[in-house]
Image (cartoon, grey):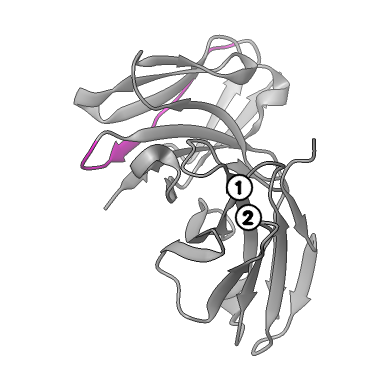
Amino acid sequence: DAGVTQSPTHLIKTRGQQVTLRCSPKSGHDTVSWYQQALGQGPQFIFQYYEEEERQRGNFPDRFSGHQFPNYSSELNVNALLLGDSALYLCASSLGRGREQFFGPGTRLTVL
Amino acid sequence: AQSVTQPDIHITVSEGASLELRCNYSYGATPYLFWYVQSPGQGLQLLLKYFSGDTLVQGIKGFEAEFKRSQSSFNLRKPSVHWSDAAEYFCAVGANFGNEKLTFGTGTRLTIIP
């Protein structure tokens, strides 16, 4: 049973570019949450998707957007990249309003 | 708004010694509390969780945590640490049903010395 998978593992972009990160939830899960973890910090909640809709959003600008597909996989898009967007981006999946989020290994984004 | 404080940025413990990592939370209702562990370059692994009931919860790898409502704390303990326990530990609080956003502390880095 595959856990949460994310791609790519690492990514290097330059300021102003756009990036798309991908996440496949754990088998049987239908809810995907995205977190940003800056170096030396705890993860910060970006948003959560359920039934292909954004259900909850953290304190992130509109440059951060997402999508959930019918197969429950999800994408995180970041436009107009800033140096401060460099971080580990973590995807977590869960089942409906279940009580446990399972995390993927993350995508390390470096913005130069 | 919910928040988590982990007052210890870095803790060093000898192998075989006991461990306690501190976590204080702020949340207006009954909290859902979690401890996660993160090895370098890895994602987060859930160690244990508290939703309700018995205030002493057991987790994986021999860890346990105690919920103390009066102190707004959820400290993580282990009676005897192993070198493989060296990692970053995060305490988190969840909102409704535990499936809404998780708010994490800044983490405690654990170093194990022989």
State the SS at label 2.
strand
Q: Nearer the viewer, residue A73 or B21?
A: A73
Residue B113: tell me if it is visible.
Answer: yes
Residue B37: quarter of image: top right
Q: Amino acid at mark 2?
A: Leu
Whether A88 is among the magenta residues is no
Residue identified by numbered label 1:
A93
- Residue A87: image location, x then y, percent: 62, 64
Q: Which residue is mark 2?
A: A90
Q: Quadrant of residue A78?
A: bottom right
The image position of residue A24, as x and y in percent, is: 72, 54
The residue closer to the viewer here, B1 or A40, is B1
- Is there any visible trace of residue B6 in the rendered image? no
Q: Residue at x 74, y 80 (%)?
A: A13
The amino acid pointed to by label 1 is Ser
Residue at 59% x, 10% y is B80
